[in-house]
Amino acid sequence: MTSGQYDKLTAEEQRIKVAELCKYKVAYTKDEWPYLIGPDGIICSGVYHFNMEEDLWKDFTPDYLKDLNACHAFEKLIISEDQQDGYIDHLEYICSGLRWDFATATAAQRCKAFVLTMTERS
């Protein structure tokens, strides 16, 4: 995914993209009812799960674009040295290009850098 493609996504689509890269996925029962499987394997089944009535992505995925703690969790998924270097490079670019500005990156900026890093072709 390119920076331009990412920027065309709505905030909700950006959040879902991060969640997908964090191994959240939607599956369907044989009756075609959707449910969400989290990265820890826990199944979230929608409307009746914990009495939540909003859609699965909103109910069961972190608000990555606003939550630095959620970003910290996905940053742990950046394992290889190439990915780590790419992530820092993307953050530096997104945060005005100054070497240390990435340290104060917002959650939304970290999300963009994460998506760009994790979707780069090797």
Image: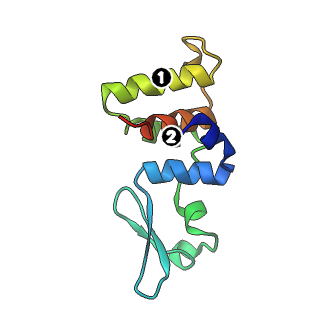
Residue 66 visible at all: no
Point out residue 62 in the picture as x, y percentages from the top left corner: 54, 52
Q: Residues within 10 Å of mark 1 (few under 14, many from 20)?
A: some
Point out residue 8 in the picture as x, y percentages from the top left corner: 68, 45
Point out residue 87 in the picture as x, y percentages from the top left corner: 46, 28
Q: Residue at x 57, y 63 (%)?
A: 59
Q: Secondary structure at mark 1?
A: helix
Residue 31 visible at all: yes
Q: Residue at x 58, y 76 (%)?
A: 51
Q: Are marks 1 and 2 in contact (CB under 8 Å)?
A: no
Residue 48 against residue 26 in the figure, above or below = below
* Residue 115 numbered mark, or none: 2
Q: Residue at x 44, y 58 (%)?
A: 24
The answer to which of 64 and 119 lies nearer the viewer is: 119
Looking at the rendered structure, the kind of residue marked 1 is: Ile
Q: Secondary structure at mark 2?
A: helix
* Residue 88 numbered mark, or none: 1
Point out residue 81 in the picture as x, y percentages from the top left corner: 32, 25
Q: Residues within 10 Å of mark 2 (few under 14, many from 20)?
A: many
Indicate the quadrant containing the C terminus: top left, top right, bottom left or bottom right: top left
Looking at the rendered structure, the kind of residue marked 2 is: Val
Quadrant for residue 108, please give it.
top right
Q: Earlier in the sequence, mark 1 or mark 2?
A: 1
Residue 66 against residue 105 in the figure, above or below = below
Residue 70 against residue 84 in the figure, above or below = below
Viewed as shown, does residue 122 lie left or right of 60? Answer: left
* Residue 16 numbered mark, or none: none
